[in-house]
Amino acid sequence: MLRIHFSAGDLARTRVADGLDPLWEIVLSIHQLHERRRDPVLRSWRHDARTPGVRAQRVLAPLMPPQGYFPDFLTPAAASGGLECGIDAVLSTPRHQLRSEVTLLSARNPVPAWARALADGECDTLRRVGQALRQYHASVLEPSWQRITHRTEADRLNRSRTQCRLGTEAMLRTFAPLLRWQPPVLCADYPVDRDMHLHGRGLLLVPSYFCRRTPVALVNETLLPVLVYPARPEPPGPPAVPESRLAPLLGHTRTAVLQTLRHPRTTTELAGHAGVSLSSASEHAAVLRRAGLVTSTRESHCVRHALTPLGAELLTGNT
């Protein structure tokens, strides 16, 4: 059982992450590739992921055993800024942290001979790990990244919307039965019995596509408190306001664009679903963004658009 203890200050500082964390997805997807109790939902992904990135998996898998401890330095907070930010943070891990965490890993699991060089902060070995992270992401995760981000973004938006409207405690209750909010403690089934005290720092909740069955927390409690949880499918929401009621306000095309964004989409996806050109989709998204109804986030070579809480409220007629 995991018990996370909150104070009033912790509730004020608790939030859902702004987006997907690529390093957590790397670690947890490798767990799924080697998990004995295989989730049937991931069967087709697992089949496609076996061959690509084999060399990268050989480097990473010994550092990320599917059961028990794996080093916290592999999932730094900086990865919230993207894959390269995360890899830079891994390569910059202080030597004392590397030595402590690799030693703890080797005490519980067999590790390759080069792990000693990793524990010593040897630059070439660190770069080898960084390159393996990059190659694994490109070959194994990138082909499914759109599906992965869609699932986690839908979950993230639902949690954030609830927190914005009803407060943090109401948001924490949306995790039942996975997490059980028993004020002032958040409880979850966990492989070990553990009490986690936030000490006023709050909790960062990170949705994950590859996290299954139970949440995951960092071992080192001096780091920013993080709880990674399984993103769930978007629950059916209330029916959208009929177009006839929104069209006089927004226009038929802009209403169609807003309704299309009930699910986050790139500009190209938005254009296809709304039946408009790329330039028109971009223009309508910009107008809706300026009105506070839509957010737009750059992801690599594309821009992903999503409803804000205000946009969702307008669409469902709850404003």
Image (cartoon, grey):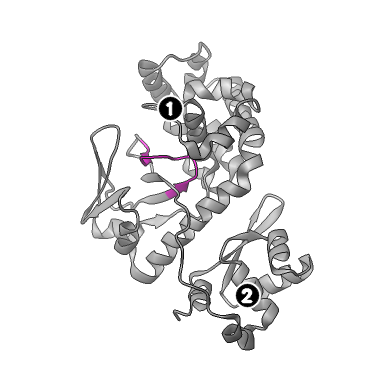
Compute the Cα span from label 1 to label 2.
44 Å
Q: Quadrant of the C terminus?
A: bottom left
Q: Give me the residue at 34% from left, 69% from top.
A: 166
Q: Residues within 10 Å of mark 1 (few under 14, many from 20)?
A: some
Residue 188 counted in the magenta span = no
**Where in the figure is residue 196, as x and y percent of width and height?**
26, 42
Amino acid type, mark 2: Leu
Is residue 77 or residue 235 the one in the foreground? 235
Range of the magenta residues?
Answer: 206-218
Confirm whether residue 126 shows in the render.
yes
Tag 2 residue:
288
Q: Is 311 on the left or on the right of 169, as rendered?
A: right
**Where is 207 relative to 135, above or below?**
below
Amino acid type, mark 1: Pro
**Where in the figure is residue 47, as x and y percent of width and height?**
59, 30
Sequence-first tag of 1 and 2:
1
Tell me the number on the disc at residue 66: 1
Our reading of the magenta stretch's main secondary structure is loop
Are the residues flagged by discs 1 and 2 in contact, CB closer than 8 Å? no
Q: Secondary structure at mark 2?
A: helix
Can you tell which of label 1 and label 2 is closer to the viewer? Answer: 1
**Where in the figure is residue 275, as x and y percent of width and height?**
74, 69
Q: Quadrant of the N terminus?
A: top left
Q: Secondary structure at mark 1?
A: loop
Is residue 257 or residue 110 the one in the foreground? 257
Q: Give me the residue at 51% from left, 23% from top.
A: 61
Q: Give me the residue at 46% from left, 63% from top.
A: 236
Residue 213 counted in the magenta span = yes
**Where is 61 relative to 211, above or below?**
above
As drawn, the residue found furthest toward the top would be 113
